[in-house]
Amino acid sequence: MDLNLLVVIILYKKDLEDSIAYQTLTKASAKSFLIYDNSPVPGKTPSVHNAKIHYVSDTSNQGLSHAYNYAADYAIKHGFDWIFISDQDTFFHDGIIREYDRAVKENPDIKLFLPHVRIAVDGKYMSPVKINRYFAKLSDSAPAGIINPGNYAIINSGMMINTAAFINAGGYNEKVWLDFADFQFIERFARKYDRAFVIDLDCIQSFSDKEDTITQKIARYKNFCSSVKHYQPIKASDRFWIFLVTLKRCASLCAQSKKLTPISIFLKEYIL
């Protein structure tokens, strides 16, 4: 394989060797890793399995976007042509790096490659799926081949991005530190590049919203509001649709919890 690839895995409260992403990507013959650990306490020193690992501990947890920008800067300085980003809990097929290598050779002008991502609970697709005004739904199908990334919701995990194109697109918005970080990046990227390639290969994602308790969902909503509040849409009028997405989540959580706590969070973390 000819891919000059840096794999970037974001950890949070998990040791590297317990990460499904790390386990499966090493089986897929990934050789160079940047491990960005946002845990409040540094994890165990990672062991090396025929791979080069650059480990970063960020106990202040500056967020996903900061980690990805750090990784892109590292990739530029160390001569990596591509960065492959992943969270800690995505299961990747052991042929994924080989398939990306083949796709790059067949589509040399494309700067973004991504897989199909299904959720573990019911197998529905969560990426890429059609998006309408920042609203996206899980789907029973997903496209393959060349797409316009601006027309789809694409999650971070599994994306392989040309490093120079990452920088040219403006990278990630570090104020959008968690939720909607992927939406913000894809919107920026699609302004510069109107084509991406979807590998016809399924990855499996642990989707916390399907498994979390209502208390955990409310706590996550607080993070959602503090992140999406700083979203910078290409069109100023799109702020209205982001407002509606945030309000809809608030209403849904109020209905599920039979509490008004989500309204208080919405007002304090998003409005004020």
Image (spheres, helix red, strand yellow):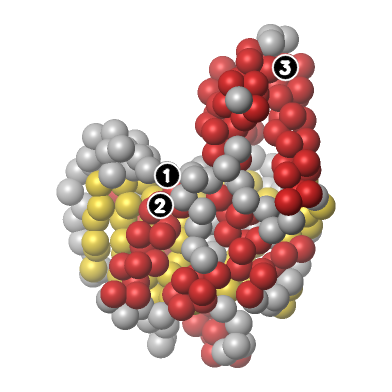
State the SS at label 3. Answer: helix
For the residues labelled 2 and 1, say whether their Cβ atoms are less than 8 Å apart: yes
Quarter occupied by residue 2: bottom left
Q: Is residue 211 visible?
A: no
The CA span between labels 2 and 1 is: 6 Å
Instruction: Identify the amino acid type marked 3.
Output: Cys
Category of crowding for the residue at label 1, using alpha-carbon neighbours closer than 10 angstroms: few (below 14), some (14–19), many (at least 20): some
Q: 217 or 28, which is in the foreground?
A: 217
Instruction: Identify the amino acid type marked 2.
Output: His
Instruction: Select label 1 or label 3 by which is in front.
Output: 1
Give the number of marks.
3
Location of residue 156 with respect to 97 vertically, above or below: above
Question: Which of the numbered marks, if any, corresponds to residue 254?
Answer: 3
Question: Which of the numbered marks, if any, corresponds to residue 63?
Answer: 1
Category of crowding for the residue at label 2, using alpha-carbon neighbours closer than 10 angstroms: few (below 14), some (14–19), many (at least 20): many
Q: Which residue is mark 2?
A: 66
Which residue is at a point 78% across and 57% down the rendered structure image? 130
Question: Which of the numbered marks, if any, corresponds to residue 135?
Answer: none
Residue 139 horizontal side relative to residue 54, left or right:
right
In the rendering, at what x and y percent does residue 8 appear? 38, 61
Q: Earlier in the sequence, mark 3 or mark 2?
A: 2
The CA span between labels 3 and 2 is: 31 Å
In the rendering, at what x and y percent does residue 253 appear? 70, 21
Location of residue 2 with respect to 180 vertically, above or below: below
Instruction: Identify the amino acid type marked 1.
Output: Gly
Q: Earlier in the sequence, mark 1 or mark 3?
A: 1
State the SS at label 2. Answer: helix
